[in-house]
Image: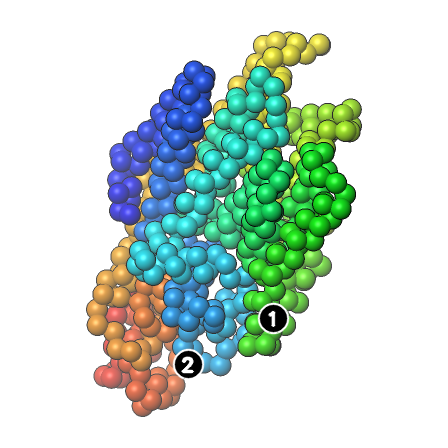
Amino acid sequence: MELFTDNIIVTITAFLLSFTAFAVSAILHSKNKCKISLVVLIAGGLLLRLVVSSDLYLHPHDEKFHALVAKNITRHPLKPTLYDNPVHNVNYKDWSSNNVWLHKQPFPLWTIAASISILGNNEFAVRFPSVILSALGIWLIYLICMFFFTGKNQKRIAWMAAFLYAINGLILELTGGRVATDHYDLFFMVLILTAIYFTIKFIQTGRLYYNVLTGLFIGLAVLTKWLPAYIVLPVWILLVYDSDKFKTKQIVTNFLILTTVSFAVFLPWQIYIHSAFPAEAAYTSSFNLRHLTEVLDNQTGPFYFFFARMGTNYGELVYLPLVFLIIYVIRNHKDLKKLSIVVWIFVPLLFFSFSKTKMQAYILFIAPALFMISAWFWHTAREKQLSGINKYLKYAVLALMLILPVRYCIERVKPFSSESRNPEWSKNIKEFAKTPIPEKSLLFNYSRPIEAMFYADITAYSHLPGLKDLNDYLKNGYTVYINLNENIPTEVLNTKELVFVELE
């Protein structure tokens, strides 16, 4: 994927082409050519995702860890490891340097591992599943929005919601692995969307297999980001009850089927890891719970952290649609579809606000609901005469509701940035990986050991051991590489059996 790398003209051209596609899609949609309009919209969104996914290096938080574990999973799918062949005693409580890696649930890792097996051991293979899922979300949100909103603006609302999703800067960054939690939160959001889509299909058709598919995707979401996946359940209950197509007994029966299927998807893995890796699994379970009561990895913020971040991530005027939604539901409490959107947004928002550990993408899975109500508010406000509000102010607000997300898209994609997307350290470690490396090899004194182990089949560490330890490794048949810098002691430099390399 060197197409967009270090060629600012190509990157800018691709970025402009994507927005040209969005403009063409809008024109087609205005002429009621909805299917082809949606195809063009998805194509524009896919192009944006290819641009942000073409960096030729692994990003530090947290993509490099996910990439390395996925690479190791290609060799042993049921044993996720970070350091596949550690030569030091490892602390299983340190997720950034341990052996068996249960820090995250396995579904995204298995998917990325499958991509690496097909596309090769490279950055784009790591990001390809997220690119496809992220683009799929454009289609899903359009269809879901068509269910939640009716009337003459139904298709317009659906198109705008899909457009806001397609250009969202945070979603794009996560797709490209550029920011923390990267592919995991992207996967989780799309899996939640898919579960809600199959909920809608079940309601519309009454067919059991759609309900089973809903349970399947909830289970996969649990195998991605754990129990917040069950936000789908209250949404399912409200929508199924609102449809007036099912008797109480049918609702209860299908609810039990749904939950049983979801448990059948994620429970086997939990049972397996507690049996195969009891110490690691027990610690990981306790670590997950500690997110609620402790600040982990220095990731925290005030109670209103997520409320504040919403303005940055989804446009500073996103609070207007939220207030509009709440007022609407209070006045129209029998509209259970809108109430389900309230649940979709505010239950996770409040839950994670009480959590001590906070990161911006934890609530990414409410983003589709925010896009839908933003589009709904926009079209409602555009057509209504708002008493006491100057019409020019109204149109200025409506314009900003589109301009601000576009601005954020540009800031996150960085199409005009001259910063290298193929840094020297990445080139160097890849060149090193191309050289013949013996099977039992170690690399020391390299500041990017996780990246080194992804690109090369070697065990790497950032520290430099003492001469005695180095000699022990040599006696045990290891080929020992030392990354050169000014801090290497003379006695190490004079050890002829060591192999010295310059990687940064």
Residue highlighted by disc 2: 87
Residue highlighted by disc 1: 271
Count neighbours of disc 1 (C-alpha within 10 A) and say few if under 14, some if 14 to 19, many if 20 or more: few
Nearer the observer: mark 2 or 1; the answer is 1
Quadrant assignment, res 481:
bottom left
SS at badge 1: helix
Q: Position of residue 205 (x, y in %)?
A: 59, 37
Farthest residue to the left: give it. 435
State the residue in front, 55 or 125.
125
Q: Residue at x 67, y 62 (%)?
A: 290
Quadrant assignment, res 102:
bottom right
Q: Amino acid at mark 2?
A: Val
Q: Amino acid at mark 1?
A: Ile
State the residue in front, 467 or 295.
295
Total numbered badges shown on the rendered structure:
2
Residue 238 vertical placement versus 149 (above, below): below
Q: Is residue 493 visible to the viewer in this orientation of the structure?
A: no
Q: Position of residue 6 (x, y in %)?
A: 27, 43
Q: Residue at x 34, y 61 (%)?
A: 117
Does residue 246 appear left or right of residue 401 in this picture? right
Q: Position of residue 325 (x, y in %)?
A: 69, 28
Residue 298 vertical placement versus 447 (above, below): above
Count neighbours of disc 2 (C-alpha within 10 A) and say few if under 14, some if 14 to 19, many if 20 or more: few
Q: Position of residue 268 (x, y in %)?
A: 58, 67
- Cα distance between the residues tagged 2 and 1: 29 Å
